[in-house]
Image: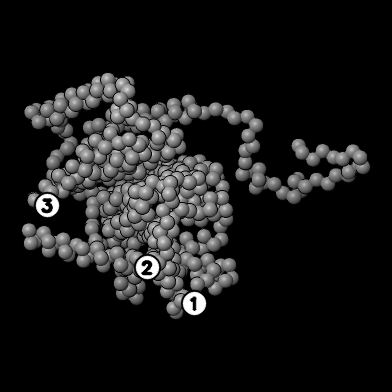
Amino acid sequence: MIEYLQILGQEVYKIIFLLIPILVSVAMIVWLDRRVWGLVQKRRGPNVVGPFGLFQTLADALKYIFKEIIIPASANKVVFILAPIVTMTLALVAWAVIPMSENLVLSDINVGILYLFAVSSLGVYGIIMGGWASNSKYPFLGAIRSAAQMVSYEVSIGIIIINVLLCVGSLNLKDIVIAQKEMWYVIPLFPMFVIFFISALAETNRPPFDLPEAEAELVAGYQTEYSGMMYAMFWLGEYANILLMCAMGSILFLGGWLPIMDIYPLNLIPAPVWMISKILFLFLLFALIKAIVPRYRYDQLMRLGWKVFLPFSLLYLILTSSFLFYFDKLPKVDF
Amino acid sequence: MIVHTIFFYFFSVIAIFSSLMVITSRSTINSVFFLILDFISVGCLFIMVGAEFLGMILLIVYVGAVAVLFLFVVMMLNVAEQKQSWFIGRKSTHIPTGLIVSVLILLELLVVVGGWKYKQDLMSSSTLVMSNISNTHQLGLVMYTDYILYFQLAGVVLLLAMIGAILLTFRERVGVKKQSYLNQISRNPANAVELKEVESFKGVKIDD
Protein backbone atom coordinates (compact mmCIF):
# COMPACT_ATOMS: atom_id res chain seq x y z
CA MET A 1 0.00 0.00 0.00
CA ILE A 2 2.89 2.34 0.85
CA GLU A 3 4.26 1.98 -2.69
CA TYR A 4 0.96 3.04 -4.19
CA LEU A 5 0.87 6.08 -1.96
CA GLN A 6 4.40 6.92 -3.02
CA ILE A 7 3.51 6.58 -6.72
CA LEU A 8 0.40 8.67 -6.13
CA GLY A 9 2.47 11.33 -4.38
CA GLN A 10 4.97 11.48 -7.25
CA GLU A 11 2.18 11.79 -9.80
CA VAL A 12 0.47 14.57 -7.87
CA TYR A 13 3.81 16.36 -7.65
CA LYS A 14 4.29 16.04 -11.42
CA ILE A 15 0.74 17.19 -12.13
CA ILE A 16 1.17 20.28 -9.96
CA PHE A 17 4.38 21.13 -11.76
CA LEU A 18 2.55 20.79 -15.07
CA LEU A 19 -0.51 22.80 -14.05
CA ILE A 20 1.20 25.81 -12.47
CA PRO A 21 3.25 26.73 -15.57
CA ILE A 22 0.15 26.31 -17.73
CA LEU A 23 -1.94 28.60 -15.53
CA VAL A 24 0.85 31.18 -15.42
CA SER A 25 1.34 31.02 -19.17
CA VAL A 26 -2.40 31.36 -19.72
CA ALA A 27 -2.25 34.57 -17.69
CA MET A 28 0.71 35.80 -19.74
CA ILE A 29 -0.93 34.84 -23.00
CA VAL A 30 -4.02 36.90 -22.17
CA TRP A 31 -1.72 39.87 -21.70
CA LEU A 32 0.02 39.13 -25.01
CA ASP A 33 -3.33 38.83 -26.77
CA ARG A 34 -4.55 42.19 -25.50
CA ARG A 35 -1.18 43.79 -26.19
CA VAL A 36 -1.11 42.62 -29.82
CA TRP A 37 -4.70 43.66 -30.23
CA GLY A 38 -3.85 47.11 -28.94
CA LEU A 39 -0.76 47.51 -31.10
CA VAL A 40 -2.70 46.62 -34.25
CA GLN A 41 -5.24 49.30 -33.39
CA LYS A 42 -2.47 51.83 -32.59
CA ARG A 43 -3.23 51.73 -28.88
CA ARG A 44 -0.82 50.69 -26.15
CA GLY A 45 -2.86 47.92 -24.59
CA PRO A 46 -2.44 47.04 -20.90
CA ASN A 47 0.78 48.72 -19.74
CA VAL A 48 0.19 49.96 -16.20
CA VAL A 49 0.33 47.04 -13.75
CA GLY A 50 3.89 45.78 -13.38
CA PRO A 51 6.65 45.99 -16.01
CA PHE A 52 5.06 46.41 -19.50
CA GLY A 53 1.72 45.66 -17.84
CA LEU A 54 2.69 42.03 -17.39
CA PHE A 55 0.73 41.67 -14.15
CA GLN A 56 -2.49 43.00 -15.66
CA THR A 57 -4.05 39.52 -15.78
CA LEU A 58 -3.14 38.83 -12.16
CA ALA A 59 -4.82 42.09 -11.17
CA ASP A 60 -7.88 41.09 -13.19
CA ALA A 61 -7.91 37.69 -11.51
CA LEU A 62 -7.78 39.33 -8.08
CA LYS A 63 -10.68 41.53 -9.07
CA TYR A 64 -12.70 38.51 -10.23
CA ILE A 65 -12.02 36.65 -6.98
CA PHE A 66 -13.44 39.47 -4.89
CA LYS A 67 -16.55 39.93 -7.03
CA GLU A 68 -19.80 38.37 -5.97
CA ILE A 69 -20.93 35.22 -7.75
CA ILE A 70 -24.51 35.77 -8.84
CA ILE A 71 -26.65 32.76 -9.70
CA PRO A 72 -29.88 33.70 -11.51
CA ALA A 73 -33.01 32.69 -9.60
CA SER A 74 -34.46 30.67 -12.48
CA ALA A 75 -31.21 28.92 -13.38
CA ASN A 76 -30.60 25.23 -12.96
CA LYS A 77 -28.12 25.67 -10.11
CA VAL A 78 -26.17 22.43 -10.33
CA VAL A 79 -25.58 22.61 -14.08
CA PHE A 80 -24.92 26.34 -13.86
CA ILE A 81 -22.09 25.83 -11.37
CA LEU A 82 -20.81 22.72 -13.14
CA ALA A 83 -20.42 24.39 -16.56
CA PRO A 84 -17.32 26.57 -15.89
CA ILE A 85 -15.77 23.72 -13.89
CA VAL A 86 -16.21 21.36 -16.85
CA THR A 87 -14.74 23.91 -19.27
CA MET A 88 -11.67 24.57 -17.16
CA THR A 89 -11.05 20.91 -16.22
CA LEU A 90 -11.25 19.72 -19.81
CA ALA A 91 -8.95 22.48 -20.98
CA LEU A 92 -6.31 21.56 -18.38
CA VAL A 93 -6.69 17.76 -18.55
CA ALA A 94 -5.63 17.67 -22.19
CA TRP A 95 -2.15 18.98 -21.33
CA ALA A 96 -1.25 15.65 -19.75
CA VAL A 97 -0.18 14.19 -23.09
CA ILE A 98 1.54 17.19 -24.70
CA PRO A 99 5.26 16.34 -25.02
CA MET A 100 7.54 19.31 -24.37
CA SER A 101 10.63 17.29 -25.27
CA GLU A 102 11.54 13.66 -25.80
CA ASN A 103 11.32 12.88 -22.06
CA LEU A 104 9.35 15.78 -20.69
CA VAL A 105 5.79 14.48 -20.86
CA LEU A 106 3.41 13.59 -18.06
CA SER A 107 1.86 10.53 -19.68
CA ASP A 108 3.11 9.05 -22.91
CA ILE A 109 0.08 7.08 -24.11
CA ASN A 110 -0.30 5.11 -27.33
CA VAL A 111 -3.34 6.99 -28.53
CA GLY A 112 -2.20 10.49 -27.59
CA ILE A 113 -3.64 12.27 -30.59
CA LEU A 114 -7.02 10.57 -30.15
CA TYR A 115 -7.01 11.63 -26.51
CA LEU A 116 -6.37 15.23 -27.53
CA PHE A 117 -9.11 15.07 -30.14
CA ALA A 118 -11.55 13.51 -27.65
CA VAL A 119 -10.88 16.09 -24.96
CA SER A 120 -11.15 18.99 -27.38
CA SER A 121 -14.45 17.63 -28.66
CA LEU A 122 -15.76 17.39 -25.09
CA GLY A 123 -15.04 21.09 -24.65
CA VAL A 124 -18.41 21.94 -26.16
CA TYR A 125 -20.21 20.60 -23.08
CA GLY A 126 -19.10 23.42 -20.83
CA ILE A 127 -20.56 25.93 -23.27
CA ILE A 128 -23.83 24.06 -23.86
CA MET A 129 -24.34 23.46 -20.14
CA GLY A 130 -23.60 27.10 -19.30
CA GLY A 131 -25.92 28.37 -22.00
CA TRP A 132 -28.77 26.09 -21.13
CA ALA A 133 -28.55 26.34 -17.35
CA SER A 134 -28.66 30.16 -17.44
CA ASN A 135 -32.29 29.82 -18.55
CA SER A 136 -32.10 32.97 -20.61
CA LYS A 137 -32.48 33.72 -24.30
CA TYR A 138 -29.07 35.03 -25.33
CA PRO A 139 -26.92 32.45 -23.53
CA PHE A 140 -29.08 29.71 -25.00
CA LEU A 141 -28.71 31.05 -28.54
CA GLY A 142 -24.96 31.29 -27.99
CA ALA A 143 -24.79 27.71 -26.74
CA ILE A 144 -26.78 26.37 -29.68
CA ARG A 145 -24.58 28.24 -32.15
CA SER A 146 -21.48 26.98 -30.44
CA ALA A 147 -22.61 23.36 -30.46
CA ALA A 148 -23.35 23.41 -34.19
CA GLN A 149 -20.11 25.24 -34.95
CA MET A 150 -17.82 23.00 -32.93
CA VAL A 151 -19.36 19.77 -34.19
CA SER A 152 -19.01 20.98 -37.79
CA TYR A 153 -15.38 21.94 -37.53
CA GLU A 154 -14.40 18.82 -35.60
CA VAL A 155 -15.13 16.82 -38.72
CA SER A 156 -12.52 18.59 -40.80
CA ILE A 157 -10.00 18.57 -37.92
CA GLY A 158 -10.49 14.80 -37.72
CA ILE A 159 -9.75 14.34 -41.41
CA ILE A 160 -6.67 16.58 -41.16
CA ILE A 161 -5.40 14.45 -38.27
CA ILE A 162 -5.92 11.33 -40.43
CA ASN A 163 -3.77 12.99 -43.12
CA VAL A 164 -0.91 13.37 -40.66
CA LEU A 165 -1.38 9.92 -39.17
CA LEU A 166 -1.12 8.34 -42.61
CA CYS A 167 2.37 9.81 -42.92
CA VAL A 168 3.39 8.81 -39.38
CA GLY A 169 1.87 5.38 -38.85
CA SER A 170 1.34 5.87 -35.12
CA LEU A 171 -1.09 7.63 -32.83
CA ASN A 172 1.58 8.47 -30.28
CA LEU A 173 2.40 12.17 -30.10
CA LYS A 174 6.12 11.48 -29.63
CA ASP A 175 6.21 9.30 -32.75
CA ILE A 176 4.42 12.03 -34.67
CA VAL A 177 7.13 14.53 -33.73
CA ILE A 178 10.02 12.14 -34.36
CA ALA A 179 8.62 11.25 -37.79
CA GLN A 180 9.11 14.91 -38.79
CA LYS A 181 12.86 14.80 -38.31
CA GLU A 182 13.48 14.87 -42.08
CA MET A 183 10.84 17.38 -42.99
CA TRP A 184 8.15 19.17 -41.01
CA TYR A 185 4.70 18.21 -42.22
CA VAL A 186 3.87 21.87 -42.78
CA ILE A 187 5.76 21.61 -46.11
CA PRO A 188 4.10 18.61 -47.80
CA LEU A 189 0.74 19.18 -46.06
CA PHE A 190 0.67 22.98 -46.23
CA PRO A 191 -3.01 23.26 -47.33
CA MET A 192 -3.94 20.99 -44.43
CA PHE A 193 -2.02 23.23 -42.04
CA VAL A 194 -3.99 26.25 -43.23
CA ILE A 195 -7.29 24.42 -42.85
CA PHE A 196 -6.26 23.11 -39.43
CA PHE A 197 -5.43 26.61 -38.30
CA ILE A 198 -8.76 28.03 -39.46
CA SER A 199 -10.66 25.11 -37.95
CA ALA A 200 -8.80 25.63 -34.69
CA LEU A 201 -10.04 29.23 -34.69
CA ALA A 202 -13.59 27.96 -35.12
CA GLU A 203 -13.16 25.19 -32.56
CA THR A 204 -12.00 27.61 -29.87
CA ASN A 205 -14.64 30.24 -30.75
CA ARG A 206 -12.01 32.81 -31.59
CA PRO A 207 -12.63 35.73 -33.95
CA PRO A 208 -13.54 35.66 -36.85
CA PHE A 209 -15.70 32.74 -35.70
CA ASP A 210 -16.72 34.04 -32.27
CA LEU A 211 -20.44 33.82 -33.05
CA PRO A 212 -21.29 32.09 -29.73
CA GLU A 213 -20.33 35.27 -27.92
CA ALA A 214 -21.01 37.82 -30.64
CA GLU A 215 -21.35 40.85 -28.44
CA ALA A 216 -23.27 42.87 -30.98
CA GLU A 217 -26.08 40.32 -31.15
CA LEU A 218 -25.94 38.15 -28.05
CA VAL A 219 -24.55 40.42 -25.29
CA ALA A 220 -21.82 37.91 -24.38
CA GLY A 221 -23.33 34.65 -25.56
CA TYR A 222 -23.19 31.72 -23.20
CA GLN A 223 -21.36 33.65 -20.48
CA THR A 224 -23.87 36.49 -20.19
CA GLU A 225 -25.24 35.40 -16.80
CA TYR A 226 -21.87 34.51 -15.28
CA SER A 227 -20.01 36.72 -12.88
CA GLY A 228 -16.96 36.77 -10.67
CA MET A 229 -14.80 33.70 -10.41
CA MET A 230 -17.11 31.57 -12.54
CA TYR A 231 -16.71 33.94 -15.46
CA ALA A 232 -12.95 33.92 -14.89
CA MET A 233 -12.95 30.13 -15.08
CA PHE A 234 -14.72 30.19 -18.46
CA TRP A 235 -12.19 32.71 -19.59
CA LEU A 236 -9.15 30.73 -18.35
CA GLY A 237 -10.53 27.55 -19.91
CA GLU A 238 -11.00 29.32 -23.22
CA TYR A 239 -7.41 30.55 -23.31
CA ALA A 240 -6.03 27.19 -22.13
CA ASN A 241 -7.96 25.63 -25.03
CA ILE A 242 -6.44 28.12 -27.46
CA LEU A 243 -2.95 27.29 -26.20
CA LEU A 244 -3.79 23.62 -26.51
CA MET A 245 -4.83 24.07 -30.13
CA CYS A 246 -1.54 25.91 -30.79
CA ALA A 247 0.37 23.03 -29.15
CA MET A 248 -1.56 20.53 -31.28
CA GLY A 249 -0.77 22.50 -34.43
CA SER A 250 2.93 22.67 -33.59
CA ILE A 251 3.07 18.93 -32.85
CA LEU A 252 1.17 17.89 -35.96
CA PHE A 253 2.74 20.28 -38.45
CA LEU A 254 5.64 22.28 -37.05
CA GLY A 255 7.75 19.41 -35.71
CA GLY A 256 7.06 19.82 -31.99
CA TRP A 257 10.29 20.19 -30.04
CA LEU A 258 12.56 19.67 -33.07
CA PRO A 259 14.80 22.59 -34.12
CA ILE A 260 14.31 24.18 -37.54
CA MET A 261 17.46 22.50 -38.83
CA ASP A 262 19.58 19.93 -37.01
CA ILE A 263 22.78 21.98 -37.28
CA TYR A 264 25.25 23.13 -34.66
CA PRO A 265 24.07 26.38 -33.08
CA LEU A 266 20.39 25.57 -33.48
CA ASN A 267 20.41 22.18 -31.80
CA LEU A 268 22.06 23.60 -28.70
CA ILE A 269 18.83 25.36 -27.78
CA PRO A 270 16.91 23.03 -25.42
CA ALA A 271 13.89 21.23 -26.83
CA PRO A 272 11.17 22.81 -24.63
CA VAL A 273 12.28 26.26 -25.81
CA TRP A 274 11.62 25.24 -29.41
CA MET A 275 8.23 23.82 -28.49
CA ILE A 276 7.24 26.93 -26.53
CA SER A 277 8.43 29.27 -29.29
CA LYS A 278 6.36 27.35 -31.86
CA ILE A 279 3.29 27.55 -29.62
CA LEU A 280 3.90 31.28 -29.18
CA PHE A 281 4.30 31.76 -32.93
CA LEU A 282 0.94 30.11 -33.60
CA PHE A 283 -0.62 32.12 -30.78
CA LEU A 284 0.68 35.36 -32.29
CA LEU A 285 -1.12 34.41 -35.51
CA PHE A 286 -4.29 33.78 -33.47
CA ALA A 287 -3.95 37.20 -31.82
CA LEU A 288 -3.27 39.00 -35.12
CA ILE A 289 -6.27 37.37 -36.76
CA LYS A 290 -8.45 38.47 -33.86
CA ALA A 291 -7.38 42.05 -34.50
CA ILE A 292 -7.57 42.19 -38.30
CA VAL A 293 -10.41 39.94 -39.49
CA PRO A 294 -14.11 40.89 -39.22
CA ARG A 295 -16.62 38.39 -37.86
CA TYR A 296 -18.19 35.84 -40.20
CA ARG A 297 -21.92 35.55 -40.72
CA TYR A 298 -23.40 32.31 -39.42
CA ASP A 299 -24.36 30.83 -42.80
CA GLN A 300 -20.92 31.72 -44.17
CA LEU A 301 -19.36 29.86 -41.26
CA MET A 302 -21.39 26.74 -41.94
CA ARG A 303 -20.74 26.96 -45.66
CA LEU A 304 -17.00 27.23 -45.08
CA GLY A 305 -16.97 24.22 -42.78
CA TRP A 306 -19.16 21.81 -44.71
CA LYS A 307 -18.91 22.89 -48.34
CA VAL A 308 -15.30 24.03 -48.56
CA PHE A 309 -13.14 22.47 -45.84
CA LEU A 310 -14.71 19.02 -45.68
CA PRO A 311 -14.57 18.20 -49.43
CA PHE A 312 -11.14 19.75 -49.77
CA SER A 313 -9.62 17.86 -46.86
CA LEU A 314 -11.19 14.61 -48.10
CA LEU A 315 -9.66 15.24 -51.52
CA TYR A 316 -6.29 15.94 -49.97
CA LEU A 317 -6.61 12.76 -47.91
CA ILE A 318 -7.04 10.77 -51.11
CA LEU A 319 -4.07 12.60 -52.66
CA THR A 320 -1.87 11.94 -49.64
CA SER A 321 -2.74 8.26 -49.42
CA SER A 322 -2.31 7.76 -53.18
CA PHE A 323 1.07 9.48 -53.08
CA LEU A 324 2.25 7.41 -50.12
CA PHE A 325 1.01 4.19 -51.72
CA TYR A 326 2.33 4.87 -55.22
CA PHE A 327 5.81 5.94 -54.14
CA ASP A 328 5.92 3.21 -51.49
CA LYS A 329 6.41 5.70 -48.69
CA LEU A 330 3.81 4.27 -46.32
CA PRO A 331 5.25 4.05 -42.80
CA LYS A 332 6.66 0.63 -42.00
CA VAL A 333 5.59 -0.74 -38.66
CA ASP A 334 7.52 -3.67 -37.30
CA PHE A 335 5.54 -5.99 -35.08
CA MET B 1 -3.73 -5.51 -8.90
CA ILE B 2 -5.73 -4.16 -5.97
CA VAL B 3 -5.75 -0.67 -7.44
CA HIS B 4 -6.91 -2.11 -10.75
CA THR B 5 -9.84 -3.83 -9.04
CA ILE B 6 -10.77 -0.70 -7.12
CA PHE B 7 -10.83 1.34 -10.33
CA PHE B 8 -12.79 -1.36 -12.15
CA TYR B 9 -15.52 -1.35 -9.50
CA PHE B 10 -15.46 2.44 -9.32
CA PHE B 11 -16.13 2.85 -13.05
CA SER B 12 -18.61 -0.01 -13.31
CA VAL B 13 -20.64 1.21 -10.34
CA ILE B 14 -20.78 4.67 -11.95
CA ALA B 15 -21.74 3.12 -15.30
CA ILE B 16 -24.58 1.05 -13.82
CA PHE B 17 -25.80 3.85 -11.59
CA SER B 18 -25.85 6.36 -14.44
CA SER B 19 -27.59 3.97 -16.84
CA LEU B 20 -30.28 3.45 -14.21
CA MET B 21 -30.55 7.22 -13.80
CA VAL B 22 -30.95 7.63 -17.57
CA ILE B 23 -34.22 5.71 -17.53
CA THR B 24 -35.53 6.92 -14.19
CA SER B 25 -34.62 10.60 -14.02
CA ARG B 26 -37.57 12.91 -14.47
CA SER B 27 -36.11 15.59 -16.64
CA THR B 28 -34.94 14.68 -20.11
CA ILE B 29 -31.89 16.92 -19.88
CA ASN B 30 -30.68 15.09 -16.80
CA SER B 31 -31.18 11.81 -18.65
CA VAL B 32 -28.88 13.01 -21.41
CA PHE B 33 -26.27 14.15 -18.89
CA PHE B 34 -26.36 10.74 -17.20
CA LEU B 35 -26.08 9.09 -20.61
CA ILE B 36 -22.90 11.08 -21.18
CA LEU B 37 -21.56 9.99 -17.78
CA ASP B 38 -22.39 6.40 -18.72
CA PHE B 39 -20.51 6.68 -22.02
CA ILE B 40 -17.49 8.18 -20.29
CA SER B 41 -17.30 5.50 -17.60
CA VAL B 42 -17.69 2.71 -20.19
CA GLY B 43 -14.91 4.39 -22.18
CA CYS B 44 -12.73 4.30 -19.06
CA LEU B 45 -13.50 0.59 -18.63
CA PHE B 46 -12.42 -0.01 -22.24
CA ILE B 47 -9.15 1.79 -21.56
CA MET B 48 -8.63 -0.25 -18.39
CA VAL B 49 -8.75 -3.57 -20.27
CA GLY B 50 -6.20 -2.22 -22.78
CA ALA B 51 -8.61 -1.39 -25.59
CA GLU B 52 -7.43 2.22 -25.63
CA PHE B 53 -8.39 2.84 -29.27
CA LEU B 54 -11.98 1.68 -28.71
CA GLY B 55 -12.23 3.73 -25.52
CA MET B 56 -11.07 6.91 -27.24
CA ILE B 57 -13.30 6.32 -30.27
CA LEU B 58 -16.23 5.81 -27.91
CA LEU B 59 -15.43 9.17 -26.32
CA ILE B 60 -15.00 10.95 -29.65
CA VAL B 61 -17.98 9.50 -31.48
CA TYR B 62 -20.57 9.02 -28.75
CA VAL B 63 -19.72 11.73 -26.24
CA GLY B 64 -18.19 14.24 -28.64
CA ALA B 65 -20.77 13.99 -31.42
CA VAL B 66 -23.83 11.82 -30.78
CA ALA B 67 -24.56 13.00 -27.24
CA VAL B 68 -23.99 16.62 -28.27
CA LEU B 69 -26.66 16.20 -30.93
CA PHE B 70 -28.95 14.50 -28.36
CA LEU B 71 -28.51 17.43 -26.02
CA PHE B 72 -29.01 19.83 -28.92
CA VAL B 73 -32.28 18.19 -29.95
CA VAL B 74 -33.58 17.87 -26.39
CA MET B 75 -32.86 21.55 -25.71
CA MET B 76 -34.23 22.75 -29.05
CA LEU B 77 -37.47 20.75 -28.92
CA ASN B 78 -38.07 21.86 -25.34
CA VAL B 79 -39.03 18.41 -24.14
CA ALA B 80 -37.21 19.03 -20.89
CA GLU B 81 -40.51 19.49 -19.08
CA GLN B 82 -42.01 16.25 -20.32
CA LYS B 83 -42.81 14.07 -17.32
CA GLN B 84 -42.10 10.40 -17.63
CA SER B 85 -45.30 8.43 -17.34
CA TRP B 86 -43.58 5.76 -15.25
CA PHE B 87 -43.91 7.90 -12.14
CA ILE B 88 -47.23 9.55 -12.78
CA GLY B 89 -49.21 6.34 -12.85
CA ARG B 90 -50.47 6.41 -16.40
CA LYS B 91 -49.79 3.24 -18.32
CA SER B 92 -46.67 3.59 -20.38
CA THR B 93 -46.83 2.33 -23.95
CA HIS B 94 -43.07 2.00 -24.24
CA ILE B 95 -42.64 -0.88 -21.82
CA PRO B 96 -43.61 -3.81 -24.14
CA THR B 97 -41.40 -2.56 -26.98
CA GLY B 98 -38.55 -1.88 -24.61
CA LEU B 99 -38.90 -5.34 -23.08
CA ILE B 100 -38.79 -7.05 -26.48
CA VAL B 101 -35.70 -5.12 -27.52
CA SER B 102 -33.85 -5.69 -24.25
CA VAL B 103 -34.67 -9.42 -24.18
CA LEU B 104 -33.37 -9.72 -27.76
CA ILE B 105 -30.16 -7.88 -26.87
CA LEU B 106 -29.69 -10.12 -23.80
CA LEU B 107 -30.12 -13.24 -25.97
CA GLU B 108 -27.61 -11.95 -28.53
CA LEU B 109 -25.11 -11.20 -25.78
CA LEU B 110 -25.60 -14.68 -24.33
CA VAL B 111 -25.01 -16.28 -27.72
CA VAL B 112 -21.91 -14.20 -28.44
CA VAL B 113 -20.28 -14.39 -25.01
CA GLY B 114 -21.26 -18.05 -24.52
CA GLY B 115 -20.00 -19.02 -27.90
CA TRP B 116 -16.76 -17.20 -27.27
CA LYS B 117 -16.25 -18.87 -23.91
CA TYR B 118 -17.05 -22.48 -24.85
CA LYS B 119 -15.93 -22.68 -28.46
CA GLN B 120 -12.85 -20.60 -28.73
CA ASP B 121 -12.09 -21.17 -32.39
CA LEU B 122 -15.54 -19.83 -33.28
CA MET B 123 -14.36 -16.24 -33.15
CA SER B 124 -10.77 -16.72 -34.12
CA SER B 125 -9.26 -14.90 -37.02
CA SER B 126 -6.60 -16.10 -39.41
CA THR B 127 -4.55 -12.92 -39.19
CA LEU B 128 -4.97 -11.99 -35.55
CA VAL B 129 -2.06 -13.23 -33.52
CA MET B 130 -2.16 -12.22 -29.89
CA SER B 131 1.09 -10.49 -29.22
CA ASN B 132 2.26 -7.32 -27.62
CA ILE B 133 1.45 -5.10 -30.59
CA SER B 134 -0.82 -2.21 -29.77
CA ASN B 135 -4.56 -2.45 -29.73
CA THR B 136 -4.88 0.00 -32.63
CA HIS B 137 -2.65 -2.08 -34.90
CA GLN B 138 -4.47 -5.28 -33.96
CA LEU B 139 -7.82 -3.74 -34.84
CA GLY B 140 -6.47 -2.48 -38.14
CA LEU B 141 -4.95 -5.84 -38.99
CA VAL B 142 -8.24 -7.65 -38.47
CA MET B 143 -10.57 -5.03 -39.85
CA TYR B 144 -8.77 -4.42 -43.12
CA THR B 145 -7.97 -8.05 -43.90
CA ASP B 146 -10.59 -10.55 -42.70
CA TYR B 147 -13.52 -8.19 -42.44
CA ILE B 148 -12.74 -5.68 -45.20
CA LEU B 149 -15.97 -6.49 -47.04
CA TYR B 150 -18.17 -6.02 -43.97
CA PHE B 151 -16.28 -2.89 -43.03
CA GLN B 152 -16.82 -1.35 -46.45
CA LEU B 153 -20.45 -2.47 -46.47
CA ALA B 154 -21.05 -0.82 -43.11
CA GLY B 155 -19.58 2.37 -44.53
CA VAL B 156 -21.84 2.23 -47.58
CA VAL B 157 -24.91 1.61 -45.39
CA LEU B 158 -24.04 4.64 -43.27
CA LEU B 159 -23.51 6.76 -46.39
CA LEU B 160 -26.89 5.65 -47.74
CA ALA B 161 -28.55 6.52 -44.43
CA MET B 162 -26.99 9.97 -44.54
CA ILE B 163 -28.02 10.59 -48.15
CA GLY B 164 -31.51 9.35 -47.34
CA ALA B 165 -31.83 11.69 -44.38
CA ILE B 166 -30.67 14.63 -46.49
CA LEU B 167 -33.08 13.70 -49.28
CA LEU B 168 -36.02 13.39 -46.87
CA THR B 169 -35.48 16.80 -45.34
CA PHE B 170 -34.48 18.56 -48.53
CA ARG B 171 -36.96 21.00 -49.96
CA GLU B 172 -36.55 23.57 -52.66
CA ARG B 173 -37.20 26.99 -51.24
CA VAL B 174 -38.54 29.64 -53.57
CA GLY B 175 -37.95 33.35 -53.30
CA VAL B 176 -34.85 33.05 -51.15
CA LYS B 177 -32.00 35.38 -51.93
CA LYS B 178 -28.76 33.49 -52.35
CA GLN B 179 -25.32 34.90 -52.06
CA SER B 180 -23.03 34.02 -54.95
CA TYR B 181 -19.41 34.66 -54.10
CA LEU B 182 -18.39 34.46 -57.77
CA ASN B 183 -20.86 37.16 -58.77
CA GLN B 184 -19.81 39.36 -55.88
CA ILE B 185 -16.14 39.11 -56.67
CA SER B 186 -16.53 39.51 -60.42
CA ARG B 187 -18.46 42.79 -60.13
CA ASN B 188 -16.61 45.86 -61.30
CA PRO B 189 -17.58 49.52 -61.47
CA ALA B 190 -18.04 49.41 -65.25
CA ASN B 191 -20.99 47.04 -65.19
CA ALA B 192 -22.25 47.69 -61.68
CA VAL B 193 -22.87 51.42 -61.95
CA GLU B 194 -25.26 52.86 -64.47
CA LEU B 195 -26.03 56.50 -65.01
CA LYS B 196 -29.58 57.40 -65.93
CA GLU B 197 -31.20 60.59 -67.10
CA VAL B 198 -34.19 61.11 -64.79
CA GLU B 199 -37.17 62.78 -66.40
CA SER B 200 -39.21 64.98 -64.08
CA PHE B 201 -42.56 63.58 -62.82
CA LYS B 202 -41.74 60.17 -64.28
CA GLY B 203 -38.96 58.88 -62.10
CA VAL B 204 -36.91 55.86 -62.90
CA LYS B 205 -37.19 52.21 -62.06
CA ILE B 206 -34.15 51.17 -60.12
CA ASP B 207 -34.80 47.65 -58.97
CA ASP B 208 -34.25 44.86 -61.44
- x then y, percent, for residue A3: 8, 61
Name the amino acid, label 2: Ser
Whether residues under marks 3 and 2 lie with C-beta atoms below 8 angstroms apart, the answer is no
Q: Residue at x 44, y 35 (%)?
A: B78
Query: Please, is residue A44 above or below residue A152 in the view?
Result: below
**Residue at the far right in the pictured view:** B200
The three-letter code of the residue at mark 3 reads Val
Residue linked to disc 3: B3
> A233 or A310: nearer the eye?
A233
Marks 3 & 1 on one chain: no
**How many discs appear?**
3
Left or right of B192: which side holds A2?
A: left
Nearer to us: label 3 or label 1: 1
Please provide percent x and percent y for residue B105. 22, 26
- Mark 2: few, some, or many residues within 10 Å (few <14, many ≥20)? some
Q: Give the residue furthest to the bottom.
A: A51
Q: Nearer the viewer, residue B86 or B193?
A: B86
Amino acid of disc 1: Val
Local secondary structure at mark 1: loop
- Residue A149 shows in this picture: no
Residue under the image location 44 percent in, 78 percent down: A50
Q: Residue at x 27, y 58 (%)?
A: A96
Q: Residue at x 7, y 62 (%)?
A: A2
Whole-percent x and y of residue A219? 53, 53
Q: What residue did someone put label 1 on? A: A48
* Chain letter, disc 2 residue: A
**Label 3: how many residues lie within 10 Å, few (<14), some (14-19) or many (20+)?**
few
Secondary structure category for the residue under label 2: helix
Residue position marked by numbered label 2 in the rendering = A25
**Residue B185 makes an appearance in the image:** yes
Separation of marks 3 and 2 at Cα, in angstroms: 35 Å
